[in-house]
Amino acid sequence: MDKLRFGLIGCGGISRIHSRELLNLDEAELVAVADKSPASAQQLGESLNVDWYSDHRDLLARDDIDVVNILTPSGTHAELVELAARHGKHVIVEKPLDVHLAPAERAIAACRGAGVKLAVISQHRFDQSTMRVKEDMATGKLGAPVLAQATVHWFRGQSYYTRSPGAGTWAMDGGGVLMIQALHTIDIMQHIMGPVESVMGHTGTFTHDGIEVEDTAVAILTFKNGALGTISATTSAYPGLDTRLEVIGEQGSAVIRNHILTRLYYREPGAAEGMFGSPADNQAPEWTENEGNAHRRQFLDMINAIREDREPLVNGEESLHVLKVILAIYESARTGKRVYVESITETPVYVRRGED
């Protein structure tokens, strides 16, 4: 079959991964890029030997582009998705779909109305580690879910939040470490464990001056299936520590560290156990994920969804689950109360720590 032709809107750092992985797909052809900064658009376009534009509307006006990848700041996503849908383009948009619920829902409706596919980047769902643990939980190999712990302890210097006018603001980023850095790990946690019922959270800004959003957050989660979970996230952990997800079921446990499955244990039926359990061998496969491979697999899923006229595995509706969890944590941090995720029907009013 003919290749699908792609255009990129947004030529920042993530565009390098998108362009590289599209170029590695036989089913795709990258033909154009756009950015409001002419210098950024020209630099990326010329490095890839593709057309470049300083106005994304010129890219969308082309009738030879099938899919657009939207890689702009989070607060601009929904508007650009709607515009692309009106031009009849299928859309891949970086996470989150938007930082507010109403625009995100409008973007989903726009794509439905235009008959185009919408995929939201959640590349770590396509990691071999995530797929293995998800399968073992879904098939009962790990037993009923008991507990999950997500840890994202990264470091971002002050310059990270001054790199552009919208960085570290509610309007453009929609949140801090939870929305920007920890979203992927929270997403795969609820993808493996099941839907989140309620949250209790606390947030704070401790080591970065002049930003509106949190650089540190903790939360306790209850899942609809009765399991429990915790989240610990910060961009204040100098010089940058690990991303880690522990998943515990009644019959086994798994550890995903920096997106690699490093521990996988099953309780053997009938095995003799002492007070502290029994010796167990690490059954994790020896995998080495290469950066970007998961993006490639998600792009291929989108290509196949278009060709087969089916939904992408992470469509707009699916992406709203983790967005609502994060918004519920913000609401809990604001009110000091337990918040039920299904009660989140609009974006909460954000209040900084120490404000009334």
Image (cartoon, rainbow, N blue to C red):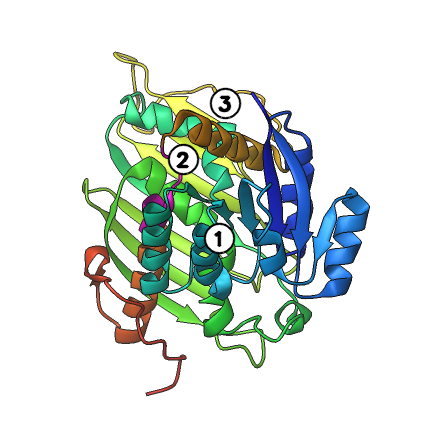
Label 2 CA crowd tier, 10 Å (few <14, some 14–19, many 20+): many
Q: Determine the residue positioned at 39% across, 84% down.
A: 354
Q: Amino acid at mark 1?
A: Ala
| Element under disc 3 | loop
Label 1 CA crowd tier, 10 Å (few <14, some 14–19, many 20+): many
Residue closest to the eye, 130 or 12: 12
Q: CA distance from mark 3 to mark 1?
A: 42 Å
Instruction: State which region is magenta.
Output: 311-321
Q: CA distance from mark 2 to mark 3?
A: 28 Å
Report the mark closest to the observer, 2 or 3: 2
Q: Which residue is mark 3?
A: 284
Asked whether residue 236 is drawn in magenta, I would say no
Q: Are marks 1 and 2 in contact (CB under 8 Å)?
A: no
Q: Is residue 163 left or right of residue 203?
A: right
Asked whether residue 314 is drawn in magenta, I would say yes
Q: Which mark is residue 84?
A: 1
Query: Quadrant of the image for the N terminus?
Result: top right
Q: Would you place residue 325 above or below residue 351 in this image? A: above
Q: Residue furthest top?
A: 270
Give percent across and percent down for residue 313.
39, 34
Q: CA distance from mark 1 to mark 2?
A: 17 Å
Earlier along the polypeptide chain: callout 3 or callout 1?
A: 1
Q: Determine the residue positioned at 73% across, 48% down.
A: 51
Q: Which residue is mark 2?
A: 312
